[in-house]
């Protein structure tokens, strides 16, 4: 159970949970949002291209995103497995992920859905204070989650593990680990 994807609406606590889980499972945490923010901070060409999408809450074009993920997954630490956080964000990206993994004869073991109510999500985002956490951008990111990302739940129905995302970080990671154990 080492090739995993974490999905959930913005504010579901994916980033926090991904850090905890990747330590417990000893696999790298790969967050496309973090990768983009690093590029923006370092003002690389990719960062200059991605910035306006991050600022507005829109998805960075698939061609840019997929290439970045392909390169990251080719790094040696990802050979033992990985926990993807924020990728795939739509079914086209999911197709590409399937191709990347298929090229090295592997596949995803599970997709973990963190389930939280909309009230909790909005409350968490407003207290987070990230520069793209203005009310307008938050709203846009939620819309995009519903229209673009939520279809992944159907796409990955066979390997989907749904976990209640309300509670302490440790409570939630214990739930995830138990749910993963039940699947093997
Ligand atoms: P996150 O840190 O996952 O909330 O992502 C922050 C922002 O990065 C998003 O609002 C998008 O603009 C961009 N982003 C992150 N992951 C992806 C992805 N898989 N595809 C396209 N854009 C992404």
Image (cartoon, rainbow, N blue to C red):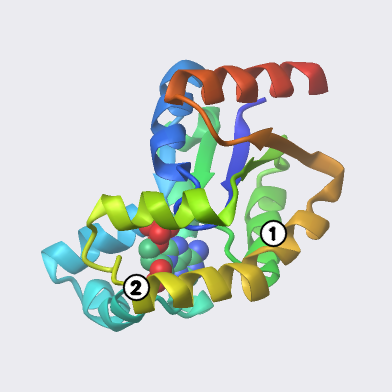
User: Along the line of sight, which residue is nearer the eye, 91 or 107?
Assistant: 91
Ligand 1, seen in the image, is in the quarter at bottom left
Identity of the residue drawn at 80% across and 40% down = 159
Q: Helix, strand, or loop for circle 2?
A: helix
Structural distance between the alpha carbons of marks 1 and 2: 36 Å
Q: Regarding mark 1 in the picture, which secondary structure is present there?
A: helix
Residue 150 visible? The answer is: yes
Vertical side of 110 occupied by 180: above or below: above
Question: Of residues 137 and 75, which is closer to you in this image?
Answer: 137
Q: Which of 10/120 is in front?
A: 120
Give left or right: position of 87 versus 159. Answer: left
For image coordinates 62% across by 25% down, the residue present is: 176
Q: Residue 103: image x %, image y %?
A: 68, 52
Task: Give left or right: position of 114 versus 130.
Answer: right
* Viewport quadrant of the C terminus: top right
Q: Is residue 59 visible?
A: no
Residue 169, quarter of the rendered image: top left
Q: Mark on residue 99?
A: 1
120 up-or-down from 18: above or below = below
Q: Which mark is residue 135?
A: 2
Residue at 29% over, 71% down? 134
Find out whether the residues at labels 1 and 2 contact each other: C-beta distance under 8 Å: no
Work out which quarter of the rendered image holds the N terminus and state it.
Answer: top right
Find residue 41 and report its horizontal and vertical position in percent. Answer: 14, 63
**Residue nearest the viewer, comparing 146 with 184:** 146
In the rendered image, the vertical position of residue 67 relative to residue 84, given as above or below? below
Q: Is residue 24 above or below residue 139?
A: above
Q: Position of residue 61 (x, y in %)?
A: 47, 80
């Amino acid at each position: 159970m080492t090739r995993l994807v974490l999905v959930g609406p913005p504010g579901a606590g994916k980033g926090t949970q991904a850090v905890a889980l990747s330590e417990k499972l000893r696999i790298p945490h790969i967050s496309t949002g973090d990768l983009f923010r690093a590029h923006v901070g370092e003002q690389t060409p990719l960062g200059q291209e991605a910035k306006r999408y991050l600022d507005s809450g829109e998805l960075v074009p698939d061609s840019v995103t997929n290439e970045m993920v392909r390169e990251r997954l080719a790094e040696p630490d990802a050979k033992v497995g990985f926990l993807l956080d924020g990728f795939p964000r739509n079914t086209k990206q999911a197709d590409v992920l399937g191709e990347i993994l298929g090229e090295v004869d592997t596949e995803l073991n599970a997709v973990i859905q963190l389930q939280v109510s909309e009230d909790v999500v909005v409350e968490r985002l407003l207290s987070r204070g990230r520069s793209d956490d203005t009310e307008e951008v938050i709203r846009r990111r939620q819309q995009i989650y519903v229209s673009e990302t939520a279809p992944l739940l159907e796409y990955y129905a066979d390997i989907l593990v749904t976990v209640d995302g309300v509670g302490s970080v440790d409570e939630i990671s214990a739930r995830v680990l138990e749910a993963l154990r039940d699947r093997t």
